[in-house]
Image (cartoon, rainbow, N blue to C red):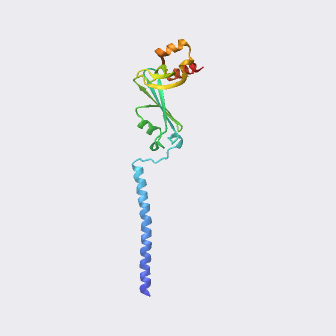
Amino acid sequence: MKKVIKWFAIVFGSLVFTICGGVAGYFVSFDKESVKNFQNDTVMAEASLENTINENTILEFVYNYSDGFSETKQDLPQQFMVGWDREQVEKAYSQWEMTEFSKDKVIFNKSVDSTSSQHYILKEDEGYIAVFYRDSDILKEVTSTPISSLSVEDRKLFEKGVSVDGDVNLIKYLESLES
């Protein structure tokens, strides 16, 4: 019976020693990691969700051309950008000037040393008024306005082609033809 008690005491002591060693090792390891981060000046902080990109943030890119026109393109951020703050976005888009940053919208501006594509020629195409890019004569769109609905003087203008510069001016001119 003494052998059983002796054997039980050895097993129980070993078990207690192992558990105590494991717990002590865990706390020592955790403490070293904290000291290591503190010594390296590592600061762990959560970013405020109000000042970061989310999946619904609108990224607006404004191209400012040397001819005075600008074009704007909008996009949603890539998945890897979610959670980025202003500094991370500025670093990734260093070729752009960031003029606005919020969780709802980020606006970038860039000056482009060339002319925009907002130079058009309007002329007749298969009985309708059509819009062509001036420099390349590539068809942009065909309107629903038939050339036959115009006065004789206006028809003559469209035989030669009517020049319009700028998207806003194009929209206004096409609206005036419809009324």
What x and y, as percent, mark residue 123? Answer: 48, 19
Residue extending furthest bottom? 1
Q: Is residue 27 above or below residue 137?
A: below
Residue drawn at point x = 56 percent, y = 14 percent: 151
Residue 56 percent location from the top left of the image: 53, 40
What residue occupies the far right of the structure in this picture?
A: 179
**Residue occupying image coordinates x 52% and y 15%:** 155
Disc tally is 0
**Residue 91: image x %, image y %?**
41, 37
Q: Quadrant of residue 173?
A: top right
Q: In the image, what residue occupies the spot 40% across and 56% down?
A: 32
Q: Is residue 154 something one can see in this rendering?
A: yes
The foreground one among 134 and 25 is: 134
Q: Nearer the viewer, residue 159 or 3?
A: 159
Q: Who is closer to the viewer here, 147 or 66?
A: 147
Q: Is residue 11 above or below residue 128?
A: below
Toward which corner of the image does residue 6 lie, by quadrant? bottom left
Q: Quadrant of the N terminus?
A: bottom left
The quarter of the rendered structure image containing the C terminus is: top right
- The reply to whether residue 165 is in sight is no
Q: Nearer the viewer, residue 129 or 52?
A: 129
User: Is residue 51 rendered to the left or right of residue 96?
Assistant: right
Placement of 10 over or under 147, stated as above or below: below
Position of residue 94 measured from the top left corner of the image (x, y, whole percent)? 41, 34
